[in-house]
Amino acid sequence: MLLISLIIGTAICFGLPITGLVFLMRRRKGAGKAFAWGAAAFVASQLLIRVPILQLLLPNFAWFGAMQLYPWAYGLFLGLTAGLAEETARWIAFRHLLKGKHTLEHGLAFGLGHGGIEAMLLVGLNMIAGAVMTLTGQAAQFPADSGSVLVAGAERLFAMAFHVGASLLILYGVRTGRGLWYWILAVALHGVLDAAVVILPAVFGVGVLGLELCVAAVGSLTLALGIRLYRTPDAPDSLKQKT
């Protein structure tokens, strides 16, 4: 059962974004470039900027250590800084690096690149390692059971849904000249999603299932909202998917 769950998780983390990329590249020129910039936006904003600041710089300040004693403050801080970093990176990419690539497919590809590389690096590589360990008779050394692996896979699925939706929000704002408002909305949604991971367990005692339901709800809502913008009657024709 562990091996099956690891295969499912690996398919979500690697197979879903790659399959989506292939599909979108066949439908729209420039989708591959949008996917690549989406991946780069995550790496730059989180791995190269935000995470080093959180782990190397801020621990030197007393206020940061004190803030960790207050789940509401710490959760909101982590959530909003994640939103500011990632949504600003999205805005920069769409505003300056992907000019003229503002269709639904470009937004979908960017979001898959952003959420896909996050899933691959943070979860997918561990799942591949776990599958190799299981196949070589070392399953007992893998620090997770099949249930935990499936939960991690589901979390990545809904996290990717959020990143796709947030990318569509930012792209729509850039395309329609209302970038500031949609950037604020994306930052707020991102802040709620990440803050909940800290606040819900610490303050309300919410367990893993409750957290996953929260991620699923925010991720699905953001994706539905992003797609909805491209389906509204007043959306510019150049934004709508050609069918």
Image (spheres, rainbow, N blue to C red):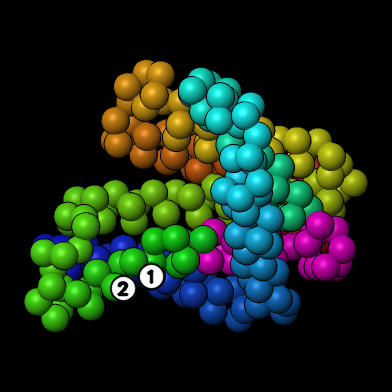
**Residue bearing the label numbered 1:** 125
Badge 1: how crowded within 10 Å, few (<14), some, or many (20+)? some
Q: Residue at x 31, y 63 (%)?
A: 9
Would you identify the image quadrant in which residue 205 lies? top left
Left or right: residue 209 versus residue 231 is left
Closest to the observer, 136 or 95: 136
Residue type highlighted by circle 1 = Leu
Placement of 214 over or under 22, stated as above or below: above
Placement of 222 over or under 22, stated as above or below: above
Residue 155 horizontal/vertical position (percent): 39, 49
Closest to the observer, 134 or 227: 134
Q: Are marks 1 and 2 in contact (CB under 8 Å)?
A: yes
Range of residues picked out in magenta: 92-117
Q: Which mark is residue 201?
A: none
| Element type where label 2 sits in the image | helix
**Residue bearing the label numbered 2:** 128
Q: Is residue 65 magenta?
A: no
Residue type highlighted by circle 2 = Ile
Mostly what secondary structure, the magenta segment?
helix
Q: Residue at x 20, y 63 (%)?
A: 142
Placement of 109 over or under 33, stated as above or below: above
The answer to whether residue 169 is seen in the rendering is no
Would you identify the image quadrant in which residue 97 lies? bottom right
| Element type where label 1 sits in the image | helix
Residue 10 horizontal/vertical position (percent): 33, 69
Would you identify the image quadrant in which residue 102 lies? bottom right
